[in-house]
Amino acid sequence: MTAVRILYNLAFPFVLLALLPGFLFRMLKRGKYRHKFGQRFAIYSPRVRQKLSRGGWTWVHAVSVGEVLIALKLIREMKNRDPQLPVVLSTTTSTGFALASREQGDNFETIYNPIDFFWTARRAVRLIRPRRLILVEAEVWPNLTAEAKAQGATLALVNARLSRRSESRYLMIRPLASAIFNQLDLLCVQEPADAKRWESLGVDAGKILCTGSIKFDDQGEDSRVRRNFRQTLAELGVGESAPVILAGSTHSGEERLIGEIVIGLKKDFPSIFYLVVPRHAERWREVREQLDRLGLRVTLRNGEQRVLENPDTLLVNTTGELRDWFDQATLVFVGKSLTAHGGQNPAEAVAAGKAVVFGPNMENFSSLAAQLVREGGASQVADATELEQKFRELLFHPERRAELAANAAKCLEAHRGATARTCRALEEFESLRGYYRTSHDVTERARAARGK
C-alpha cells in the first residue's frame, strides 16, 4: 500500500488542479463556499477542536444529502443500541452539512471532510482519533483511510455500491484499486451483484457482506416526523383529486422537458400540477426562467415572488424535503436519467408507494432499476416522447399505477432490516474492551457470517 499511496499523493495535486475550475464554479454557483472553509484543511474553531480532541469517536463520512440521510439513519440505529456513542459525521457539500447539523448534540459533531492531502487527513485523524471510520456508499479516500488505519481504527464501507461503469474504470487500474479497497475491514453491500463487482477488483470476498440497502429499509426509517405538504398544495389551489407530476432530483434540461409534457397533458387533465425538485436547489433561478418561458405559472417553495393566483407549478428551492413531497405525488419521475447519465435513487419514491418512471440512464442504480423494470415495479422510457406516453397511460389508468407500486414494494422486501443488519455487522468488530479486532480476525468473522 505504501507504493500505491506514494503514487496517489504524487498524482493527487495535479488531478485536483485539473478539476479545480469546475469545483470552484460549482462552489460559487451553489454559494456558501466560505462556510467553515478551514475545515476542508482540518483547521477547526477552538470549540470544535476541543470537542473533537476527546478522541474515541465513531467517524461516519457521507458526501452529500442523499448519503447523509443514509448515514443519519444508521447513526440513529447505532445510538438506539448505545445512546452515549460519540459520533462525528463529515460531509463534503454545504447542503449535506446543513442537513447533518440538525442532529447536533454533546455526543455528535458535524464537520466538513478534509481534502485528501496526506497532511490534512493526518491532522484530522490525529485530532479525532477515531475508533472506527464508516464510509457511506463509495467514499474511499486513500489518505484518510490510511491515516485512520494507522491510528488503529476499523474501516468499514456501508451501503456500498459499485456501478458497472465504475467497475470498468477501476478494472483499468485494478492493482491500485485492490490495494486501496483492501484497506477496508468490512464492506456491507446492497445487492449480490455489488459483491461480485467488488470481488472483481480484487477485494477479499471474506470482507464482503450483503446486508441490503439502508436507503430502502423502511424498518430503519428515521425518527423525523414526516411533513404533510397537502395543506401547502391546498393553499396553492391544488385539489385533492388533481394529478400531481413530481420530477425529483432533476438535472439541467429535465425540468423543461417535463414542463413541456405537463403542458401537453393539460388538454386531458386540466387540473394537472407540476411539482419540480431540482437535485441542486441553487439552480432555482435557471429552472424558473426556463419554466416561465414555457408559459407555466411558477411559484417557489420559499415564498419569494410567488404567483398570486392559480399557479400550476411549484418549484421547490429548499433542501431536505424531497422525501416528504413524494407523499403528494400521483406519478414520480426520477431525475438524472433523461438528459444526464447515472440516475438518481428511486428508493424513496418507491417506499412512498408511488408509481415511478425513469429514463434510460440509470447506471448508478442499475441493479435496482433493472429489478424494478423486470418485476413490473417501475417503468423505464427511452426519451421524452415515450415519457409523455407513459405519463398519459398511467394517469388514465390508476389501477396500473397501483400495480407498479405493489410490485415495487415486493422488490424492496429484501432490504427490510438492512439498517439493523449493518449495525450488527459493525458490532462484530468490537472486542470485550471496546476496541476493534485485527484485520485478520475481522476477515475470518465476516467470512463465517457470510457462510451462514
Image (cartoon, rainbow, N blue to C red):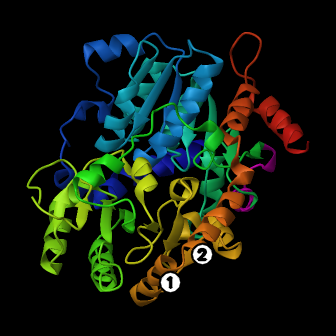
Q: Is residue 61 magenta?
A: no
**Which residue in the structure is indicated by mark 2?**
400
Mark 2 crowdedness (10 Å alpha carbons): few <14, some 14-19, many ≥20 = some
Q: Are marks 2 and 1 in contact (CB under 8 Å)?
A: yes
Question: Which callout, 2 or 1, points at the residue further toward the start of the chain?
Answer: 1
Name the foreground residue: 209 vs 124. Answer: 209
Q: Magenta-highlighted stretch: main secondary structure?
A: helix
**Of the residues shown, which amino acid type is indicated by label 2?**
Arg
Mark 1 crowdedness (10 Å alpha carbons): few <14, some 14-19, many ≥20 = few
Q: Position of residue 64 (x, y in %)?
A: 40, 46
Compared across the picture, whether 451 is left or right of 334 comes to right
**Which residue in the structure is indicated by mark 1?**
393
Secondary structure state at the residue bearing disc 2: helix
Secondary structure state at the residue bearing disc 1: helix
Quadrant of res 169: bottom right
Q: Can residue 153 be spotted in the picture?
A: no
Identify the image quadrant of the C terminus: top right
Name the foreground residue: 371 vs 160. Answer: 371
Residue 184 - label: none
Instruction: Write the start and end of the magenta stretch as one range.
Output: 193-206
**Of the residues shown, which amino acid type is indicated by label 1?**
Glu
Q: Which residue is depicted at the point 73% across and 21% down?
A: 430
Count the labels in the image. Answer: 2
